[in-house]
Image (cartoon, rainbow, N blue to C red):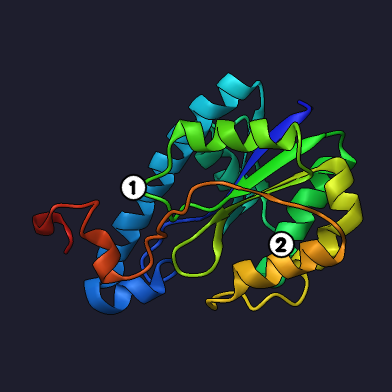
Amino acid sequence: MAARQVVVMARWPAAGRCKRRLAITTGAAAAARVQQRLTAHTLATARLAADQAQAELLLAVDGLGPRAMARWGRALGADAAVLQGRGSLGRRMQGQLQRRFQRGAQQVVLIGTDLPGLEVADLTAAFDHLQQSPLVLGPAADGGYWLIGLTRSGFERAGAALMAGMPWGSQSVLQATLEAAAARTLKPALLRQQHDLDRHPDLAPWIPSRHRR
């Protein structure tokens, strides 16, 4: 296992099982197509960044069995595919981070697939920050975060506190995370703010209007 890991949390883009808030206005099939494009963009970007940072790229999958998951991971260029596991988002994220550190990783960066503006430089910057800081966060415009990165020591000090009991899906996720980090004397580095793609208006900068339905 590489000392650096990039973990992409992804849901299989099946109609009716992903992007439900977007599907309210675009329809389930269109929302699934958007999810498919977002996932492909995220994995292509993460692959380039992982190669630059000498990191291993893992796809953490929800919505597929082990064999299909492995095929999807290979098709998207991941080094390996793993199941996300059960439970809340926080529990699944904590589990992914914990397993990576238990298996020898020293730095882990975790992202989702809702980022049309994700660039290679965003992920390499996260690893650069982890050279000096035990925690790095990518603020999202909706009050959450689009990336979390931790060193092994940072996770051991505060990993559970950063994931448990967070108001996931609300506008206060980032603030609650910063407060939990401060309570454990972790000073995070912050990346640039980005916009998640969750609702119909979020499509405007990314997809020409003729392709939104």
> Position of 12 compared to 38: left or right?
right
Count neighbours of disc 2 (C-alpha within 10 A) and say few if under 14, some if 14 to 19, many if 20 or more: some
User: Which label was assigned to residue 92?
Assistant: 2
> Position of 113 compared to 9: left or right?
left
- When asked about the image quadrant of residue 209, the answer is bottom left
In depth, the one of 64 and 165 nearer the eye is 165
Give the CA distance from mark 2 to mark 1.
23 Å
Type of the residue with mark 1: Arg
- When asked about the image quadrant of residue 84, the answer is bottom right
Q: Is residue 16 visible?
A: yes
Is 45 placed above or below 162 here? Answer: above
Type of the residue with mark 2: Arg
Helix, strand or loop status at disc 1: helix
Of pointers 2 and 1, the one earlier in the residue sequence = 1
Query: Residue visible at 77% across and 59% down?
Result: 94
Is 204 placed above or below 20 here? Answer: above
Query: Residue visible at 25% across and 63% down?
Result: 30
User: Which label was assigned to residue 37?
Assistant: 1
Quadrant placement of the C terminus: bottom left
Residue 93 position within the rendered picture, expressed as x and y whole percent measured from the top left: 70, 58
Residue 75 position within the rendered picture, expressed as x and y whole percent measured from the top left: 47, 33
